[in-house]
Image: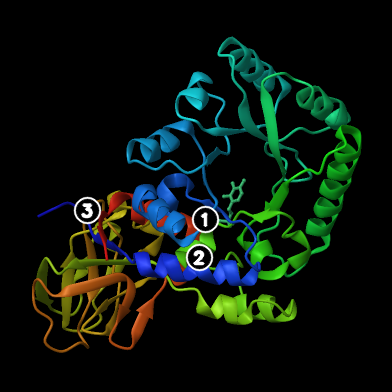
C-alpha cells in the first residue's frame, strides 16, 4: 500500500475558479499565487493549468519553487515573493524578485551590471501587514534609491493586506490609502505610471477599489473563501461576489480505503489515552492515515469522514498512521471501502473549511498539510 491518502486534484475546477476570478476583476491581469506547492495541490500541474487559462504571471514564495516550475518547462513570468537567497538564480532562471530591502536591490543591480543586462523586479512596501516590505520614515528615500539603481527594471509596486476577513474594511482602507499615496508620490517623482497590485483573494471577493492594475489571488483558485465565518454574508454585504463565493469549486478531494473493521462490545476503549469508550456494541473502522499525513490530531473525537455516503465520526485520538471511525449506524461497510476525508460522497460533503473550523484553523493550513503529504492524482 502506498503511504497515506490520495488527493484528487481537479484541474477543471482550477480552470473554473480562475475564470471566476477573471470575471470578478473584469479581465485585469491575474498574478496567480502557487506558493507552498500550490497550497498543497502541486505547483507544476496547477501552474500549467492557470497559465493556459490566461494567468499573466505565477507567484511563488522561494526560488526553489520557481526552479521546479522552470525545470518542468514553464516559461511564463514568475514572481518570487519572499526569497533573498542566491541572487544569481534570478538571472539564470529569469525570475522576477520582489524587493523589500535596498541591500538586495544593490546586490541585484551589481550583478545585472556585471552581466551587462537588466533584471525585472517588483518592489514591496509594508503598508501595515508588519511582515516584509520597505517601511518606516525612509520609504520614499529607499524607493527613490532603488528606482535610481542601474540594471533594475522596476515593473511593479506591491503591498499586502493584513486583513483576510474584510467584513470590517477600516484597516484595509488605511493600508490601501497609504499604498496609493506612496504610488502617486513615486509616480510623480519618476514621471511614469507605476504598475501596482495589492489584492489577495479577500480583496478580489469584496474590495473592488483595491483591484488596481492586477490582482494576486491564492486561496480562491483552490475553491475556498478566505473569510473566516459567514462567507456569503461578507460577500453579500459588500454587494460583490456572493455568486462568486458560491461558485468557487473545491479543487481537492482526499480519500482512503478502510483498512480493518472490528465489532467491539460496549465499554471498549479506543486509541491512545482511552479518550473514547464505546457506549454500546459498536462497529469500528481503522483507516490508514494519521497526523503524519497532515490529518491533525486536533480532529480526534471531533471530525467526521464519509463512508457509504454517511458521516462516520472519528473516535479516540488520531494516531501517527491510523485513525478510527465509528460506522455502527452505517450498513454494509466492508474492508477496502472508500472513506472520504475531504470531498463529496453521496449527498454528504466534508470541506476543508469544516475541518478548519473543527481544528480552530483556516482552510489554507488544512489544504497545505494534507495536500502536501497525500499521493496526488490529477483528474
Ligand atoms: C499568499 C499571498 C497572496 C494570496 O493570498 P490569498 O489569501 O491566498 O488570496 C497574495 N500575496 C502575497 C504576498 C501572499 O503572500
Q: Position of residue 141 (x, y in %)?
A: 86, 26
Q: Which mark is residue 55?
A: 1
Q: Residues within 10 Å of mark 1 (few under 14, many from 20)?
A: many
The residue that mark 2 highlights is 18
The span from disc 1 to disc 3 (Cα, nearest Å) is 38 Å
123 to the left or right of 35: right
Q: Position of residue 217 (x, y in %)?
A: 58, 57
The residue that mark 3 highlights is 321
Q: Residue furthest top?
A: 114
Are dots 2 and 1 in contact, CB under 8 Å? yes
Q: Quadrant of the C terminus?
A: bottom left
Q: Is residue 112 above or below residue 253?
A: above
Label 1 SS: loop
Q: Residues within 10 Å of mark 3 (few under 14, many from 20)?
A: some
The span from disc 3 to disc 2 (Cα, nearest Å) is 35 Å
Q: Is residue 26 above or below residue 46?
A: below
Q: Which badge, 3 or 2, is on the more N-terminal residue?
A: 2
The span from disc 2 to disc 1 (Cα, nearest Å) is 8 Å
Amino acid at each position: 500500500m502506498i503511504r497515506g491518502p490520495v488527493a484528487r486534484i481537479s484541474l477543471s475546477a482550477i480552470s473554473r475558479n480562475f475564470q471566476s476570478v477573471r470575471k470578478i476583476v473584469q479581465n485585469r491581469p491575474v498574478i496567480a499565487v502557487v506558493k507552498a506547492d500550490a497550497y498543497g495541490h502541486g505547483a507544476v500541474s496547477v501552474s500549467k493549468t492557470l497559465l493556459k487559462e490566461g494567468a499573466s504571471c505565477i507567484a511563488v514564495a522561494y526560488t526553489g519553487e520557481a526552479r521546479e516550475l522552470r525545470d518542468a518547462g514553464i516559461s511564463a513570468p514568475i514572481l518570487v515573493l519572499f526569497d533573498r537567497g542566491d541572487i544569481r538564480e534570478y538571472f539564470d532562471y529569469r525570475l522576477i524578485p520582489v524587493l523589500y530591502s535596498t541591500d538586495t536591490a544593490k546586490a541585484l543591480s551589481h550583478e545585472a551590471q556585471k552581466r551587462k543586462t537588466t533584471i525585472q523586479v517588483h518592489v514591496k512596501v509594508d503598508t501595515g501587514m508588519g511582515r516584509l516590505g520597505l517601511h518606516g520614515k525612509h520609504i520614499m528615500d529607499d524607493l527613490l534609491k532603488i528606482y535610481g539603481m542601474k540594471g533594475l527594471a522596476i515593473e511593479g509596486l506591491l503591498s499586502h493586506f493584513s486583513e483576510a476577513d474584510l467584513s470590517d474594511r477600516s484597516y484595509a482602507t488605511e493600508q490601501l490609502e497609504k499604498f496609493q499615496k506612496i504610488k502617486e508620490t513615486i509616480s510623480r517623482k519618476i514621471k511614469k505610471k507605476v504598475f501596482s497590485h495589492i489584492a489577495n483573494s479577500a480583496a478580489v471577493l469584496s474590495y473592488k477599489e483595491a483591484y488596481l492594475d492586477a490582482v494576486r489571488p491564492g486561496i480562491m483558485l483552490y475553491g475556498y473563501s478566505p473569510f473566516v465565518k459567514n462567507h456569503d454574508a461578507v460577500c453579500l454585504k459588500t454587494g460583490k461576489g456572493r455568486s462568486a463565493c458560491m461558485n468557487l469549486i473545491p479543487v481537492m478531494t482526499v480519500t482512503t480505503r478502510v483498512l480493518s473493521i472490528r465489532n467491539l462490545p460496549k465499554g471498549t476503549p479506543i486509541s491512545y489515552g482511552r479518550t473514547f469508550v464505546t457506549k454500546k456494541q459498536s462497529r469500528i473502522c481503522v483507516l490508514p492515515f494519521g497526523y503524519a499525513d497532515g490529518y491533525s490530531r486536533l480532529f480526534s473525537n471531533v471530525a467526521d469522514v464519509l463512508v457509504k455516503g454517511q458521516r462516520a465520526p472519528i473516535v479516540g485520538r488520531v494516531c501517527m498512521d491510523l485513525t478510527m471511525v465509528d460506522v455502527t449506524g452505517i450498513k454494509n461497510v466492508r474492508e477496502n471501502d472508500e472513506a472520504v476525508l475531504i470531498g463529496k460522497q453521496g449527498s454528504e460533503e466534508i470541506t476543508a473549511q469544516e475541518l478548519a473550523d473543527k481544528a480552530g484553523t483556516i482552510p489554507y493550513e488544512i489544504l497545505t498539510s494534507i495536500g502536501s503529504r497525500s499521493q496526488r492524482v490529477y483528474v
